[in-house]
Image (tube, helix red, strand yellow):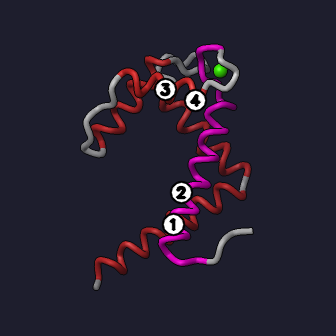
């Protein structure tokens, strides 16, 4: 089936791209900076709840999903805000992004039946 093949190509591309980003600090920093800048509408170098809500709302709209309820964004915000100072720093976003990419790589590897990473 061509669809399954296309899906596999996409999974492999995602897997390889994220593996490179995770193994290359310079690449990871570049991605982190781009995502952070995208969310940081005010450009003040930290992310607040309002900015995160707008970003997640836009992302959902882009994927054709309904925007999350306010409580859901609050929950995500508190998970990201590791030092509990009510704003998300670049480092805190980095912790999340690295974890998220690792999960994505694992998911792709599982789907592709690749051997487990050490
Ligand atoms: Ca914080």
Mark 4 or mark 1: whose residue is earlier in sequence: 4
Give the mark nearest the N terminus, 2 or 3: 3
Discs 3, 4 touching: Cβ within 8 Å: yes
Gap in angstroms between the C-alphas marked 2 and 3: 21 Å
Q: Secondary structure at mark 1?
A: helix
Q: Which comes sooner in the sequence, label 4 or label 2? A: 4
Task: Tell me: residue 14, above or below residue 94.
Answer: below
Q: Secondary structure at mark 2?
A: helix
Task: Residue 92: say if magenta.
Answer: yes
- Residue name at image x 65 percent, y 61 percent: 20
In the image, 81: left or right of 63?
A: right
Relative image position of residue 89 (x, y in whole percent):
65, 24
Residues under numbered marks 4 and 2 in contact, where contact means CB atoms less than 8 Å apart? no
Residue at x 67% of width, y 55% of height:
22
Disc 4 secondary structure class = helix
Asked if the residues shown at circle 1 and circle 2 are in contact, with their CB atoms under 8 angstroms apart, the answer is yes
Spatial CA span between label 3 and label 1: 27 Å
CA–CA distance in space, label 4 to label 2: 19 Å
Q: Quadrant of ligand 1?
A: top right
Task: Tell me which residue sits at (28%, 37%) in the image.
Answer: 61
Q: Which mark is residue 108?
A: 1
Q: Which residue is mark 3?
A: 75
Separation (CA) of disc 1 from disc 2: 6 Å
> x, y (%) of residue 101?
58, 52
Considering only order in the chain, which callout, 1 or 3, is on the residue closer to the N terminus? 3
Dot 2 crowding, Cα within 10 Å, few <14, some 14–19, many 20+? some
Residue extending farthest to the bottom is 1
The numbered mark at residue 104 is 2
Magenta region: 85-114
């Amino acid at each position: 089936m061509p669809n399954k093949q296309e899906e596999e190509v996409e999974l492999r591309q995602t897997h390889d791209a994220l593996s490179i980003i995770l193994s290359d600090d310079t690449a990871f920093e570049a991605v982190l900076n781009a995502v952070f800048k995208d969310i940081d509408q005010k450009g003040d170098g930290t992310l607040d709840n309002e900015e995160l809500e707008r970003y997640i709302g836009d992302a959902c709209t882009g994927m054709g999903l309904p925007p999350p309820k306010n409580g859901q964004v609050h929950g995500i915000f508190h998970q990201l805000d590791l030092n509990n100072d009510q704003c998300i720093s670049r480092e805190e976003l980095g912790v999340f992004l690295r974890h998220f990419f690792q999960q994505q790589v694992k998911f792709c590897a599982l789907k592709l039946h690749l051997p487990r990473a050490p």
